[in-house]
Amino acid sequence: MPGTLDGIRIVDLTTVILGPWASQTLGDMGADVIKIETPQGDVTRNMGPRKNPGMGAVFLSTNRNKRSIVLDLRTREGKDALLKIVDTADVFMHNMRPKVAKKLELSFERFTANNPKLIYCAAYGFRADGPRADDPAYDDIIQAASGIASLQQVVSDQPRFVPTIVADKTTSYNLLAAVLAALVCRERNGKGQSIEVPMFESLVDNVMIEHLYGAAFEPREGQMGYARLLNTGRRPYATKDGFLAVLPYSDENWRRMFEIAGQPELKDDPRFSNQSARVDNAQEVYDWLGEIIATRTTAEWQLALNEAAIPVTAVNSLEDLLDDEQLKATGFWRLEEHPSEGQIRMTDPPIRFKQNPSTIRKMQPQLGQHSREILVEAGYSEKDIHQLLKAKVITEPD
C-alpha cells in the first residue's frame, strides 16, 4: 500500500541529525529520498558503535528509507550533477550556512530556473537576515543561545546542556512541518517556494511558549519564567524503594490526592485550592508532594494513584525502554535484517496512518550505494558516469 508521500522525491543535502531525521520521516511516509553526500560521507557514519566502516549507530538511526549518492560539490561536474538531480525533485533540502550555500551555488533561483515547482528548504543556525546568519550552529551552541542551558540552573549550580540533542530534533520537526505545508500549498496553487528554518529562532519560540510569562505584556506583568517549572521540587519523587513521576493536575486530581494521603482538609487550604494558587505556591506544593510520596513503596503508590486516575508513571532508564510493556505491545521496536550490518534494532515510525501507513522499505545505504542508478535517472549515460567515477566526482562502494 503506497504511503502518504508516494511519488514525492526529496533531494537531501543535509547532514548530522536535524535534516536527516526529517528526511527519514518523509521517507517513512513514502517519499523517494536521495541523500547527497560528500566523498567523506555524513559525519554520523562514524558516530557510535559500528560493525563496518561508515555504518555507525547514529547514522543507522536517521537514514533508513534513503538512497545515497556521493557528489564532490567542489567540482563543476559535481555542481552540474546536483542541478540535474534536483530538476527531477519535488523538494530540495540543505543545511549550509548562507555564505557556504552561495559559494556552492545552492541558490533558490538556480534550482528553480528549470523546476519552478520546486520546494527549496534551507535549515540555518540563525535567520539569514540577522547578524549571526553565518555563525556555526550545533546543538550545544543553540541550547546555550536559546536559554535552555541557563534554565538548568534550577537544578544545578551552573548552566548545563540537556543530555539529548533537543535543538536539532525540535528544529527537525519544524523543517518537517514546513515541507509538508509547502507541498499542500503547491497542490493548491501549483507553485514552489523558498523556506527558511532556523535553529535559534525555533528554539527561542519553543522555550518562550511558557517562559515568556510576564513579558507577554508591555509593560510587563511580573517576571519571565513559568514558576511551576522553575523550582527544585519539580522532579521524580523518591518512594520507599524507587522513584515515581507523579502529577496531580486538575482540582479533582488534587482533591483525590489529599484524600489518599489522609489529609483531605488540604483541599480547602488557600495554597492548594485551585490551579492559580498551586502555581503561585509551586515550591510548597512540590515539597509536600515529595514528603508524601516518600511514605509508601512504588507499587503501593502506582496502585492507589492509578485507581484514582491521577497521572503517575515509573522512571524508565534507557535500558528499561527496550522492555517497556507499552512499546512491546505496539511493536515499536523493530528488528530488521540489514544487508551488510546483520540484525539491527530500529524504532517503528511513531505516526500511524490508517489508509496509507508509513513503512520501512529500504535499509540504511552504504556511502554512494546508489550513485549510478540516481545519475541514470537524471539522464546520464554509462559513459558519462564512467568519466565522473574516473574523476572522483562520484564514488561507489567497493
Image: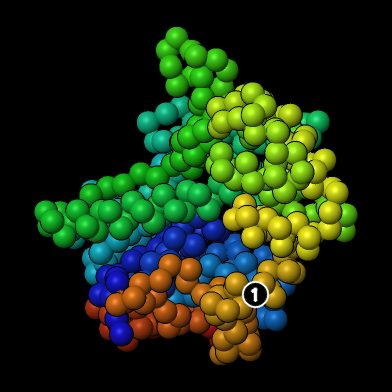
Q: Position of residue 67 (x, y in %)?
A: 42, 76
Depth order, front residue of 258/46? 258
Q: Is residue 40 above or below residue 163?
A: below
- Is residue 283 left or right of 146 when viewed as pictured? right
**Who's the residue at 82% across and 40% down the image?**
291
Depth order, front residue of 293/313? 293
The quadrant of the picture occupied by the N terminus is: bottom left
Q: Is residue 115 above or below residue 199?
A: below
**Who's the residue at 25% across and 53% down the image?**
182
Q: Position of residue 23 (x, y in %)?
A: 42, 64
By what rule are the colours in the image chosen?
A: rainbow
Find the residue positioned furthest to the right.
240
Depth order, front residue of 214/381? 214
- Is residue 118 left or right of 354 when viewed as pictured? left
* Badge 1: residue crowd in 10 Å (few <14, some 14–19, many ≥20): few
Quadrant of residue 116 in the image?
Answer: bottom left
Q: Secondary structure at mark 1?
A: helix
Q: Position of residue 199 (x, y in %)?
A: 48, 42
Q: What's under tag 1, amino acid-wise?
A: Glu
Find the residue positioned furthest to the left.
189
Q: Is residue 311 above or below residue 85?
A: above
**Who's the residue at 55% across and 15% down the image?**
222
Q: Position of residue 80 (x, y in %)?
A: 31, 64
**Who's the residue at 70% across and 45% down the image?**
259
| Residue holding disc 1 | 325
* Residue 77 visible in the shown view: no
* Residue 269 visible in the shown view: yes
**Image label count:** 1
Quadrant of residue 48 in the image?
Answer: bottom right
The quadrant of the picture occupied by the C terminus is: bottom right
Quadrant of residue 243 in the image?
Answer: bottom right
Q: Is residue 291 above or below residue 53?
A: above
